[in-house]
Image (cartoon, rainbow, N blue to C red):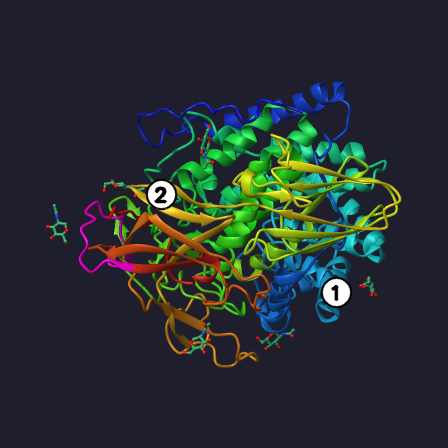
């Protein structure tokens, strides 16, 4: 255990903005040096090190051991009945993916990265198995069978280009395949066999000057695989951990090379003097672009924790905390996601965040808690999945946004020809104009295929093992967990209500741990009916309850006391929370809709031939005032009644039963480039009467204001 993880971080320098790294060195020389250093590292240092992976702090359970219950089951069923569960029926980047055709014999994809089917598969495998949905299981089995059957003689999996191969899209495909093996052992033999064959080929390619990773056609695409190398390393570690074999030395060699040959190492980015608090050049020509891309940043949060498992470098514990802390301090949204539009810039409340960023951030934070056990990560994993993710989908989950903004009172077609002095500037509402609309594939298809992993991975990671004989509830919510020593059901409306009831079935003695969120109020919290009895570990937040042997069934009630919290945001504004839910100003909801549009043709009549009329594009707008300043001293929370049931779907506008009331007034507020509410005005003079306003759970407030200016009455 490292005890100094929470010590204050070194401050960032206070002068200057983006200090560029020294990219002026001849890249060929740098590359050659990297290769030499990597081999030295592999041959000399590695030989002296024992080839063991550092253990998880709390081992994740295999897919299928933790199942959703209650409202989150309802959400996942809605997902299965919505877009995610029907992409295989009609969405051409899935049903006609290049992965499903022999090399060069057809198939389509939205980019040469060929990531659409892998993204879909990575989310649909756990969705199908956690719901035990025969239709969806049939789809993932058929895709797995086809993909494995098309493995080339030499071991490659998936499409390739005549100019060469690129590892990246294998990462999400392998994450899907390993989840399939965990959920269903019938797939063990074919999947492990195919992965081993692939890893043999990968070893030869990496030894061949880093083919497919350090050299990949066209060259610019290398950075995707390099910034995301750890996602491939996760599957290698899974093989080492679950299926040790004579191939292990080769697998270690692959890990070393995948990491060593990456020009982009996240630990190098999160360094004082390197990490930009404000990004002066938020364009692709910024040499830091691969790190600044919002989705990469979300995926990269876990990178150092993955690397630490094989490098045994304990300094990566603090590096991980620094990465998460700085990311959210300088580029975080109140909803728990990362502001990156699509490049990180600053904290302006009109900055957008991709739906892909929310789900990847959720997975990274869950991984970080399992790997390192620091409570902060688990709080933030809940925050992003309970707020940032659901706000970006319609209640029925047939339509989603590409970009959400902390202050986004409308999500309408909003094309602006926005060009900044330093070149085209990727602002949410620019480009196709469709980025904030809800639809089939607004702006770009990646989030259509990547969003389904959000809830299923969250549920799988919601419990973890503590040693051999302990079980911890990590990400709180309604769920059922089954291990060799206990079955536990947790019934709760959390995070809408903060009481959790555990029903435990076990004949062996074991330790149950419940995680205590950092925002809990000790005086209002209780365990087993005893107020102030919670004794959470300072690092992990876990409170231990010993379940004696001979117990057949037991019930434990855990109440987490909460109070309204406000967090200061830029320019004298606040974000309002109760428990782990963010509350946003209710600006109402009106919508118009059309046939869904192809991402490359966001205007015009749309696609009228799709077999599912539920697939539509929605243009959503406010119907109540949005330019409101609030008096935080008047905030008042209204919880759900004792027996209130949560509707399905819960994140529909108007569905959640909880809300907060507050006194406020309208103020004058200018727009940014005519497209979205601008920076929050300093002048807080009321332009109307003082009124009572309502704040509602952010996930249900499809259009909203969440960074609210303050006034004092
Ligand atoms: C980052 O850490 C500092 C203390 O080192 C803390 O004050 C701050 O709230 C943290 N930021 C976030 C976003 O958690
Ligand atoms: C894929 O879906 C489209 C409908 O969007 C359909 O026209 C096509 O036939 C499907 N392809 C296959 C191989 O099923
Ligand atoms: C496991 O996979 C096999 C092969 O696809 C399938 O026949 C079987 O029904 C699956 N088992 C479960 C429990 O889904
Ligand atoms: C805060 O306001 C100042 C002055 O209007 C502005 O320069 C700055 O960018 C604002 N910061 C944010 C994060 O909105
Ligand atoms: C759009 O509005 C109509 C009624 O005007 C409503 O029936 C429908 O549910 C709304 N769509 C969404 C996605 O909320
Ligand atoms: C502040 O806003 C009010 C209302 O719009 C306006 O009348 C007043 O002139 C503004 N004050 C300043 C100093 O700009």
- Give above or below for 539 relative to 188: above
Up-down: is 673 above or below 202? below
Front-most of residues 229 and 32: 229
The residue pinned by badge 1 equals 132
| Label 2 within 8 A of ligand 4 by Cβ | yes
Left-right relation of 446 to 431: right
Image quadrant occupied by the N terminus: top right
Helix, strand or loop under label 1: loop
Main secondary structure found in the magenta portion = loop
Per the image, is 676 magenta? yes
Q: Does the magenta stretch include residue 170?
A: no
Asked if residue 121 can be seen in this view, the reply is yes
Q: Residue 347 carries which label?
A: 2
The magenta stretch is: 673-691
Mark 2 to mark 1: distance in Å?
42 Å
Residue 461 x %, y %: 67, 47
Asked whether, in this view, residue 625 is left or right of residue 139, the answer is left
For residue 114, side relative to residue 191 (left or right):
left
Cβ of mark 1 under 8 Å from ligand 3: the answer is yes
| Disc 2 residue crowd, few under 14, some 14–19, many 20+, Cα 10 Å | many
Nearer to us in this view, 469 or 154: 469
Residue 287 is at least partly visible in this image: no
- Give neighbour class at mark 1: few <14, some 14-19, many 20+ (Cα, 10 Å): few
Drawn side of residue 109 relative to residue 281, left or right: right
Q: Nearer the viewer, residue 296 or 200?
A: 296
Name the residue at 60% across, 73% down. Answer: 90
């Amino acid at each position: 255990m490292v005890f100094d993880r929470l010590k204050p971080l070194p401050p960032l320098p206070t002068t200057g903005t983006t200090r560029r790294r020294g990219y002026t060195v001849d890249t060929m020389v740098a590359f050659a040096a990297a290769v030499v250093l990597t081999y030295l590292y592999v041959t000399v240092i590695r030989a002296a090190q024992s080839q063991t992976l550092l253990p998880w702090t709390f081992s994740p359970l295999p897919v299928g051991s933790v199942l959703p219950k209650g409202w989150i089951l309802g959400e996942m069923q809605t997902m299965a009945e919505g877009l995610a569960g029907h992409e295989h029926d009609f969405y051409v980047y899935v049903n006609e993916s290049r992965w499903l055709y022999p090399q060069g014999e057809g198939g389509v994809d939205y980019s040469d990265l060929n990531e659409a089917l892998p993204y879909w598969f990575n989310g649909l495998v756990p969705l199908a198995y956690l719901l035990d949905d025969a239709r969806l299981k049939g789809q993932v089995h058929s895709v797995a069978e086809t993909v494995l059957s098309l493995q080339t003689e030499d071991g490659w999996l998936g499409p390739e280009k005549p100019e060469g191969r690129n590892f990246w899209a294998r990462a999400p495909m392998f994450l899907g395949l390993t989840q399939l093996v965990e959920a269903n052992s019938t797939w063990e033999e074919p999947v492990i066999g195919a992965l081993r064959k692939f890893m043999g080929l990968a070893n030869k390619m990496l030894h061949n000057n880093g083919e497919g990773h350090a050299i990949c056609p066209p060259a610019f695409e290398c950075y995707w695989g390099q910034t995301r190398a750890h996602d491939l390393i996760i599957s290698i570690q899974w093989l080492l951990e679950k299926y040790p074999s004579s191939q292990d030395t080769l697998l270690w060699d692959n890990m070393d090379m995948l990491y060593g040959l990456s020009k982009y190492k996240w630990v190098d980015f999160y360094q004082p003097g390197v990490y930009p608090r404000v990004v002066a050049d938020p364009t692709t020509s910024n040499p830091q672009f691969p790190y600044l891309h919002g989705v990469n940043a979300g995926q990269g949060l876990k990178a150092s924790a993955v690397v630490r498992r094989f490098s045994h470098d304990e300094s990566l514990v603090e590096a991980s905390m620094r990465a998460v802390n700085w990311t959210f301090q300088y580029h975080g949204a109140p909803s728990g996601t990362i502001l990156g539009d699509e490049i990180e810039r600053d904290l302006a409340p009109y900055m957008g965040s991709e739906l892909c960023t929310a789900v990847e951030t959720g997975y990274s934070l869950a991984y970080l808690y399992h790997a390192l056990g620091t409570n902060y990560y688990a709080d933030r994993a809940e925050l992003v999945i309970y707020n940032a993710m659901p706000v970006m989908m319609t209640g029925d989950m047939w339509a989603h946004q590409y970009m959400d903004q902390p202050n986004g009172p409308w999500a309408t077609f909003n094309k602006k020809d926005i060009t900044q002095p330093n070149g085209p500037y990727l602002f949410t509402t620019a480009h196709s104009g469709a980025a904030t609309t809800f639809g089939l594939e607004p702006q770009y298809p990646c989030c259509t295929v990547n969003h389904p992993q959000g809830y299923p991975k969250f549920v799988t990671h919601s419990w973890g093992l503590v040693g051999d004989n302990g079980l911890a509830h990590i990400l709180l919510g309604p769920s059922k967990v089954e291990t060799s020593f206990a079955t536990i059901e947790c019934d709760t409306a959390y995070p809408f209500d903060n009481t959790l009831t555990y029903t435990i079935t076990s004949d062996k003695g074991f330790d149950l741990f419940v995680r205590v969120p950092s925002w809990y109020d000790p005086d209002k919290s209780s365990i087993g009916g005893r107020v102030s009895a919670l004794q959470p570990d300072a690092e992990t937040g876990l409170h231990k309850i010993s379940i004696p042997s001979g117990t057949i069934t037991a019930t434990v009630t855990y109440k987490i006391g909460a109070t309204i919290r406000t967090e200061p945001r830029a320019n004298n504004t606040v974000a309002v929370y109760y428990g782990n839910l963010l509350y946003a100003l209710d600006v109402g909801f009106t919508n118009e809709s059309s046939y869904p549009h192809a991402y490359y043709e966001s205007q015009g009549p749309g696609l009228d031939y799709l077999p599912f009329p539920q697939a539509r594009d929605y243009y959503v707008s406010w119907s109540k005032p949005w330019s409101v300043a609030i008096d935080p001293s008047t905030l008042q929370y209204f919880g759900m009644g004792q027996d209130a049931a949560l509707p399905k779907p819960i994140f529909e506008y108007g569905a959640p039963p909880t809300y907060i009331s507050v006194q406020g007034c309208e103020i004058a507020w200018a727009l940014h480039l005519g497209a979205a509410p601008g920076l929050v005005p300093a002048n807080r003079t009321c332009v109307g009467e003082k009124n009572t306003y309502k704040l509602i759970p952010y996930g249900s407030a499809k259009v909203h204001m969440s960074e609210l200016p303050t006034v004092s009455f």
